Amino acid sequence: MAPPAQALDQLLARSALGDRRAFGELYQATAAKLFGVALRILRREDWAEEVLQECYVSVWRHAREYRAARAAPMTWMTSIVRNRCLDWLRRPNPEPLADEALEALESDAAGPLALLESGRDSAALARCLRGLEAKQRQAIALAFFDGLSHDELAQHLRQPLGTVKTWVRRGLARLRSCLETQ
Amino acid sequence: MRLNDELRDRLAAEYALGTLRGRARERLRRWLRDDAALARAVAAWEARLAPMADAVAPASPPAGMWRRIENRLEPAKKQSWWKVLGLVASGAAAALVAVALLLPLQRAGIPPSYVAVLSDPQTNQPVLIASAQRNAMVLHVDTLDPKIHVAGRSLELWALPSGAQPKSLGVLAGGRSELKLLAVADRSLGDVTRLAISLEPPGGSPTGQPTGPVLYTGPCVKYW
């Protein structure tokens, strides 16, 4: 059960003032979800642990910069984690996503999307994602959930690079106009 | 570089989704520092896509993780929050701005005794000036940047006396307004070194202490 955004808001504000206990509560309330996100993208527990540690240290240091008016607390923290994961994947010493790992991805990445409908905020997004063409939806889901780049999408979906770029771009554009009418 | 709206939105979307990689990603991060519209577009896309993260199965991190994180946090300084705030804005710069702004503030020919200039720590731009005459029970507030007000939330102004808890000076109205002080300025502001603004629920903090993030802060200077 996700903690209410306002509670997280307050824990973040108290963390910004140097309150470690509040930061501990923030960790307890958010770690499992963020670890899940990192694990899904990185696919290795040791990497996900390393990245998650860095992210919490970063949240502690930058809590003062968090602006409730600009993002919900969970959105802010999730973005930090996803960005850090993507940075991790393109370190100079990459262990590139092996072919087998790519093959092992669900060929229809719509799996987690079914879960979306449970959340209230998520329902609109789920509806709009369902409204996309299957290939657009799949490309967007693989990019978001699994952190695939355009190149990796092309390889995984066995399509030319230009084609998957177009799917992603058009998919995002349709998603936006659909969400605006919700 | 100037981006048109369409390109800006497209780059923001690809950045939030994660498909923008390599040099393009680094470049966009640099632009984010100066291009407020781009930062807003990225935030909007992150918010649009955020519910997707709800669909990822949570996973319990190993038991020792919190301990390892805690060990990497800065050693617990005895952090009074006015000290935290002291790190935020450069006092000297803000005080200079205060002097530059004193002239237009002269009401009834007498310059104010107390002046505080609060600025945005991210841009260093002043957003609000508070001033008072030493024997008056009123604090004059001039909002320099009307965009600081947030729909559905209140901004609360706090006095930070050295060595004591923050004291509320009241909830800010927009534009130019006045807040009633509980005592003459010499008594209510005499030992106050900084003022700060926090984001609070409508009507102000329910606890008498700041509950939301501290958005703006600045030194409070006594001139005479």
Image (cartoon, coloured by chain):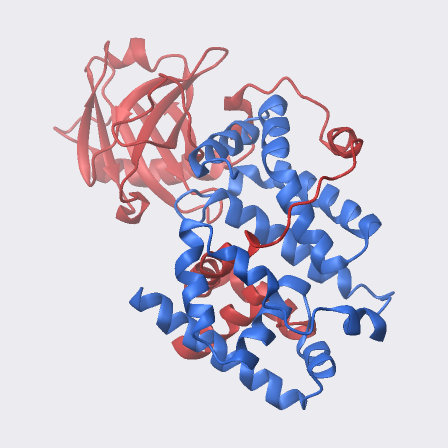
Chain colours: A blue, B red
* Residue shown at the point (67%, 72%) measured from the top left: B21
Task: Please tell me which residue lies in front, B148 or B53.
Answer: B53
Residue furthest to the left: B108
Can I make out residue B38 in this image?
yes
Horizontally, residue A177 falls left or right of residue B58, namely left
Where residue B29 sits, quadrant-wise, is: bottom right
* Residue shown at the point (25%, 15%) measured from the top left: B134
Can I make out residue A168 in this image?
no
Where residue B55 sits, quadrant-wise, is: bottom right
Picture quarter with the C terminus of chain A: bottom left
Task: Please tell me which residue lies in front, B77 or B224.
Answer: B77
Where residue A61 sits, quadrant-wise, is: top right
Percent x, y of residue A32: 66, 41
Relative to B86, say whether A174 is above or below: below
Horizontally, residue B30 falls left or right of residue B191, namely right
Relative to B213, say whether A104 is above or below: below
* Residue shown at the point (46%, 10%) measured from the top left: B164
Horizontally, residue B214 falls left or right of residue B75, namely left
Total numbered circles: 0
Percent x, y of residue B168: 33, 19
Horizontally, residue B128 falls left or right of residue A17, namely left
Percent x, y of residue B142: 24, 37
* Residue shown at the point (18%, 37%) measured from the top left: B176
Percent x, y of residue B214: 44, 33
